[in-house]
Image: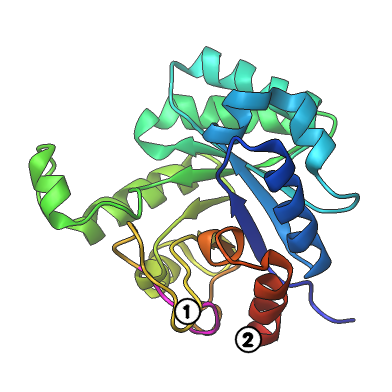
Amino acid sequence: MTRPTPVFCAIDTAELAYAARCARAAAAAGFGVKLGKEFFTAHGPTEVRAILPTGAPLFLDLKFHDIPNTVAGAIRSAAAAMAPQFVTVHASGGPAMIRAAVEAARSSRLPPQILAVTLLTSLDAADLEAIGLGGDVSGHVVRLARLAQDNGADGVICAATEIELLRRACGPDFKLVVPGIRPAGSAAGDQKRVMTPAAALRLGADHLVIGRPITEAADPDAAAQAIAQEIA
């Protein structure tokens, strides 16, 4: 059996019709759909369900970060309302918050997998210095990934340049989901740590997140199909 393409299309828009078009393009290429705060805040669970093509997995990227009880309730609600494959939390929420998210997910009828965000891929060493965390990006990423793993998370969101580092730190079974993916020739945009799809998969990424190269293309269908061919 052919391995499903491990790509989620990041659809970051509040425009309902265009989001639905991009979701259809993603599903036609064998991709899942990642919806985040912009779409969810504008439309809520009902429209998340409405635009998701039949059979397309949902990556609900809401990056929960709150007290443990609140995050647990949010995970239960998300699982019941939208049945996502993945839901994100911030690893910096701490051990109790991560455990609460995992326990809430596992208690759901259709349990989502919990992915922890270590450091946003828009951050670099200078940004860490600016917020008082020091400039060692890799050290922060590994510490937060291990914290997430130790407290039951299924994987982390990581930059492509961190794949090998996190495989050594967390082993082969911890999921690495990689945003900041840009097909050859695409602009990096506001992502500071990027890589092509083929290169990230060769290094051992489990899933890729690709947004603007599809959603900002003149023809999202053709762009998604081209990416599927690139990594086939």
196 on left or right of 105: left
Mark 2 vs mark 1, CA separation in Å: 10 Å
Q: Of 217 and 154, which appears nearest the observer?
A: 217
The answer, for residue 85, to whether it is visible in the render is no
> Mark 2 touching mark 1, by CB under 8 A?
yes
136 on left or right of 45: left
What residue lies at 53% left-to-right and 14% top-to-bottom?
70
Type of the residue with mark 2: Glu
Based on the picture, tell me whether residue 196 belongs to the magenta stretch: yes
Please tell me which of labels 2 and 1 falls first in the chain: 1
- Tag 1 residue: 196
Based on the picture, tell me whether residue 160 belongs to the magenta stretch: no
- Tag 2 residue: 230
What residue lies at 61% left-to-right and 25% top-to-bottom?
42
Query: How many numbered discs?
Result: 2
Circle 1 — which element? loop
Task: Tell me the number on the disc at residue 228.
Answer: none
Residue 76, given in percent of the width and then of the height, sits at 70, 22
Eyeballing the image, is 144 above or below 30? above
Eyeballing the image, is 225 above or below 202? above
Q: Quadrant of residue 60?
A: top right
Eyeballing the image, is 62 above or below 224? above
Circle 2 — which element? helix
Mark 2 surroundings: few (<14), some (14-19) or many (≥20) residues within 10 A:
few
Residue 103, given in percent of the width and then of the height, sits at 64, 28
What residue lies at 74% left-to-right and 42% top-to-bottom?
17
121 on left or right of 100: left
Q: Quadrant of residue 174?
A: bottom right
Range covered by the magenta-colored residues:
194-199
Type of the residue with mark 1: Thr
Mark 1 surroundings: few (<14), some (14-19) or many (≥20) residues within 10 A:
many
